[in-house]
Amino acid sequence: MRQLNIFETVKQSVSLRQAASFYGLRFRRDNNALCPFHPDRHPSMQLYDDHYYCFACGAHGDVIDLTAGLFHLQPADAVKKLAVDFAISSCDVHDAQLTENPASPEIDTFALSGKRLPTAGSAEESIHIRRRQTYFAFCEYRQFLLLWRDRLVPRPNEEFSDSYSVCCNELSRIEQYLDILQPGSLYSSDDIEALLKEKETEVSIIYEITRCCK
């Protein structure tokens, strides 16, 4: 059986939606989002299962192209960033540089957040994985809250219900956590680690809620 190279492994391990959500893109129910590659006032980027396309500026590609475009990276460096950010242990991130662009300089894929690459099995790697898992959990919960809020929107001439207000407040709380946990966050590692510890039980509950609602 042919062995997958690092590019194929990353594409099979990280969905486009996972990467888009992790790197801060907010998609509507119709899978449209504001395009990050041009000044976009109305959502013009469409997210498909295996690619994206902007109907305004023409930007398109797969999960690797999206990452490369967002962080101004070469494809090989985008693969390395995805492999690290999504803790794909089967990838040798050093091979990506040699396979795709041996002349380009070595980069730190955590440069945007001012961190070094976590070493395998280190406490830093453990926190990194927990941060990714917690971020995904809150992304899933946010989508659930958005759907619930849409159902609670009052009809014309009706007052806003208490449930609608609670849902909006919950959305604000979750989006604050996402801002703290997102890549490139300006919050300190101590603040992030404290949040991970504080919300550990809540994240487990969210996983159960989202799993039952799928």
Image (cartoon, grey):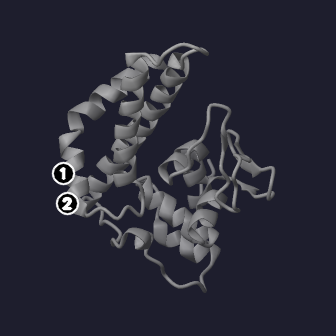
| Residue plotted at (18% across, 51% down) | 194
Q: Amino acid at mark 2?
A: Asp
Neighbour tally class for label 2: few under 14, some 14-19, many 20 plus, Cα within 10 Å:
few
Q: Secondary structure at mark 1?
A: helix
The label on residue 111 is none
Q: Amino acid at mark 1?
A: Ala
- Which residue corresponds to the image point at 61% horizontal and 36% vertical from the top-left? 28
Quarter of the image where one finds residue 96? bottom right
| Left or right: residue 61 compared with residue 206 | right
Query: Marks 1 and 2: CB-CB under 8 Å?
Result: yes
Could you tell me if residue 3 is visible in this image? Answer: no
| Residue 27 to residue 84: above or below | above
Q: CA distance from mark 1 to mark 2?
A: 6 Å
Tell me what residue is drawn at x 30 percent, y 61 percent: 187
Is residue 67 shown to the viewer in this render?
yes
Nearer to us in this view, 10 or 23 = 23
Question: In this rendering, would 71 be left or right of 179?
Answer: right
| Position of residue 159 measured from the top left corner of the image (x, y, whole percent) | 48, 16
Query: x, y (%) of residue 161?
Result: 43, 16
User: How packed is label 1: few (under 14 Cα within 10 Å), some, or many (20 or more)?
Assistant: few
Measuring from the top left, give residue 121's x and y in whole percent.
25, 58
Task: Identify the element where label 2 is drawn.
Answer: helix
Left or right, 20 with respect to 197, comes to right
Mark 2 sits on what residue? 190
Outermost residue to the front: 157
Which residue is at a point 81% across and 50% down the rendered structure image? 55
* Residue closer to the observer: 26 or 50: 26
Please determine whether, in this image, residue 189 is positioned above or below residue 210.
below
Instruction: List x then y, in percent, for residue 29.
Output: 62, 31
Residue 194's disc number: 1
